[in-house]
Image (cartoon, grey):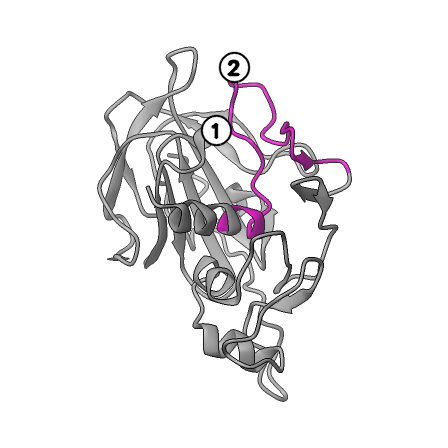
Amino acid sequence: MTEKSQRAASQVLIAMSVAAALSGCTTMPWGESSSYSGASGNYQTNGVPTGQVAAGYYRVNPGDTLPGIAAAYGQHPQDLARWNGLQPNASVTVGQVLRVAPPPAPGAPGTGAVAQQGQLTWPLRGPVLKPFASGSSKGIVIGGRVGDPVKAAAAGRVVYAGTGIEAYGPLIIIKHSDTLITAYGQNSTLLVKEGDAVTQGQVIGAVGADSRGVGSIQFEVRQDGHPVDPLTWLPKSGG
């Protein structure tokens, strides 16, 4: 994987407030990470705390560039520049806060999607091994058999597919709209690549195993860049 791809993956995860994946057992919260403070919500890169920013915004970290940030959020550099009153080739500075989501049209309602039960479909049929807990976890863990198909929860475009973030193993991130993103971690196989358009229910990967050999995937939903309970978006019938 190129350094550029790794940086883009890291920026997507920062944008989604993703913490470290499971480490040793299915009960360990995703919020445990040497670089992420789940209590304060602050992400640190190279020792520089970014702090919390409003939904739809991003605080620049060391090494960031305008094109790199735009790619991480599935936007065009020229759009990002326009939303922030910058030139397309402008440099960015550490700590600078940028708008990374389109501004709402005049008179339009807020851009945040409203959770609707059943709007997403289960990516895997299996039990929920770890539920969502606001403030202490960032998603759910769904059990399954290694090799079982992992499916896209909704139609969208793949903005990341790779292994650049070691804690997640093979990871897939799908952007469904300007406000909604889903992430699928701990796959054993990736069947899509960055830039692919996917349909709801399309097989995108295969179930992997955690460090204890338990077949499962990590599934997260991000609304306006913040973690939300996937169960409020999934059918009540279960996986």
- In the image, farthest residue toward the bottom: 106
- Which label was assigned to residue 119? none
Predominant SS along the magenta part: loop
Q: Quadrant of the N terminus?
A: top left
Give left or right: position of 65 versus 60. left
- In the image, farthest residue toward the top: 212
Q: How far apart in space, not on screen, are marks 2 and 1 (Cα)?
A: 13 Å
Which residue is painted at 54% across and 64% down in the image?
Answer: 113
Give left or right: position of 204 versus 159. left
Give left or right: position of 12 versus 134. left
Q: Disc 2 marks which amino acid?
A: Cys
- Taking depth in this image into account, of 70 and 230 the one nearest to the observer is 70
Question: In the rendered structure, which disc, 2 or 1, sits on the residue that comes first in sequence?
Answer: 2
Q: Quadrant of residue 29?
A: top right
- In the image, farthest residue toward the right: 40
Mark 2 Cα shell of 10 Å, populated few (<14), some (14-19), many (≥20): few
Which residue is painted at 43% across and 55% down in the image?
Answer: 119
Q: In which quarter of the image is residue 189?
A: top left
- Taking depth in this image into account, of 231 and 204 the one nearest to the observer is 204
Q: Which residue is denoted by mark 1 in the rendering?
A: 167
Residue 15 is inside the magenta segment? yes
Q: In which quarter of the image is the C terminus?
A: top left
- Taking depth in this image into account, of 145 and 91 the one nearest to the observer is 91
**Residue 184, image x and y in percent?**
40, 39
**Residue 98, image x and y in percent?**
64, 68
Q: Disc 1 marks which amino acid?
A: Ala
Determine whether the residue tagged by mark 1 lies in a helix, strand or loop. helix
Give, as a single range, the part of the protein colored magenta.
12-39
Which residue is painted at 62% across and 73% down in the image?
Answer: 110
Does 176 appear above or below 90? Answer: above
Does 185 appear above or below 152? Answer: above
Q: Which residue is denoted by mark 2 in the rendering?
A: 25
